[in-house]
Image (tube, rainbow, N blue to C red):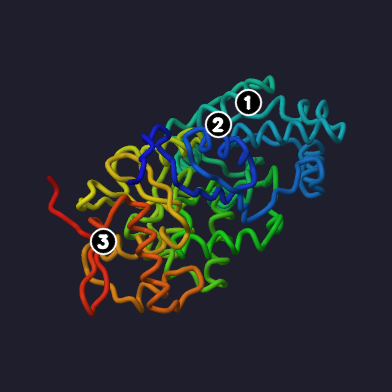
Amino acid sequence: MTIRVPLTPVLAGCTIVVAADRRSGDLVAALERRGGQVYRAPALSIIPNEDDELLIARTRDLIASPPDMVIVTTGVGFRGWIDAAHENDLAEDLAAALAGAQFIARGPKAHGAIQQAGFIADWVAESETSAEVGEYLAAEGVTGRRIAIQHHGAGADGLDTLLAGLGADVVSITVYRWGPPPDPQVVRRSVVQAGAGEVDAVLFTSAPGAAEWVRTAVRAGALESIRRRAASGRLLLAAVGPITAAPLADAGLTATLAARGRLGSLVRCVVDHYASGAAPRLHTALGAMEMRSRGVLIDGAFVPLSRAGASILSELFDAAGRVLSREELGLALPRGGESAHAVEMAVARLREALGGAAAIQTIVKRGYRLTVEEPR
């Protein structure tokens, strides 16, 4: 008889991938505190501010020819720019160059960073979107004005093109730039596992990182299986906001957005998904069942399973009561294409782990099925 450990951490049994570099340690720690097994697979690396020659060159350009306006899109990005200026002995000159500029903030965090640096924000976007900033400045008029736009990452928010088209002299300040992934093999492993059912959730914090993760999935031949698992709800793809999620949507991947575009909100998004019953659930002879990559929840109690057991049960769960042949289940075993005897042994061990044969029926000469019942 299986002893079921009461499920206290909501993410028990979940394997979660953080496909990000910046502040990934904070995400990992927060998810692990809730019971998840988390590993990092940053799809891109970040070039540090103080080592970015292009950033420093454009900073010197603004010192030589001060801007009329500074648009701050992120608090962390603006602080990073100021830090980089300090590292290169340009802070005082930059402060003097920006002293007469009008400051536009894309939200409260950007506003706070402007104040922290000793400047005053003249206008703050309530929606925290670049689109609202663009609409405001288009209405105000920017023809002939020199505008510095502080971006983060790729800076793909459309402001440069919009304001340049309206007649502004735009200087793009990208506070950090993307480089190749620290370990391409780890990224490849993450997409293969996501497609194979060995990962429950993948988290994204930047559009360039999401786009590179998708490209890796294409190269690995895993995109279609990832697409199916995400559409079924078995794989949660969570993004910090709509811009970050755009490359996922373009690839036909179902993604969930954090409510407020914050890392803390991204963690809450994952926790709520599993705590609220949003993950697929079946009512079986053993009780309400939800799959996890490292086991199964039965009436809220987590039962850890071997990799073979989790693979077999996952296939039966997805079949939702349909009979699967021994050959079909054999392909789900770790080495694939296992013999009928290997499948029978794996099913026997799985039944033992679940506390008996009630959950899995043997259909003579056909195979096995999960004992699915109508909700009580």
**Label 1 belongs to which residue?**
114
For the residues labelled 3 and 1, the Cα–Cα distance comes to 61 Å
Residue 296 versus residue 193 in the image, above or below: above
Residue 201 versus residue 69 in the image, above or below: below
Res 166 seen here? no
| Dot 1 or dot 2, earlier in sequence | 2
Q: Residue at x 63, y 25 (%)?
A: 114
Q: Quadrant of the C terminus?
A: top left
Foreground of the two, 320 or 219: 320
Secondary structure of the residue carrying tag 2 is strand
Secondary structure of the residue carrying tag 3 is strand
Residue contact between numbered discs 1 and 2, judged by CB atoms under 8 Å: yes
Residue 37 versus residue 197 in the image, above or below: above
**Label 3 belongs to which residue?**
360
Amino acid type at image mark 1: Ile
| Dot 3 or dot 2, earlier in sequence | 2
Foreground of the two, 148 or 255: 255
Q: Residue at x 36, y 70 (%)?
A: 344
Q: Residues within 10 Å of mark 2 (few under 14, many from 20)?
A: many
Amino acid type at image mark 3: Ile
Res 365 seen here? yes
Amino acid type at image mark 2: Ala
Left or right: 110 with respect to 174? Answer: left
Foreground of the two, 42 or 31: 31
Classify residue 318 by image quadrant: bottom left
Q: Residues within 10 Å of mark 3 (few under 14, many from 20)?
A: many
**Label 2 belongs to which residue?**
105
Q: Residues within 10 Å of mark 1 (few under 14, many from 20)?
A: many
For the residues labelled 3 and 2, the Cα–Cα distance comes to 58 Å
| Dot 3 or dot 1, earlier in sequence | 1
Secondary structure of the residue carrying tag 1 is helix
Left or right: 256 with respect to 48? Answer: left
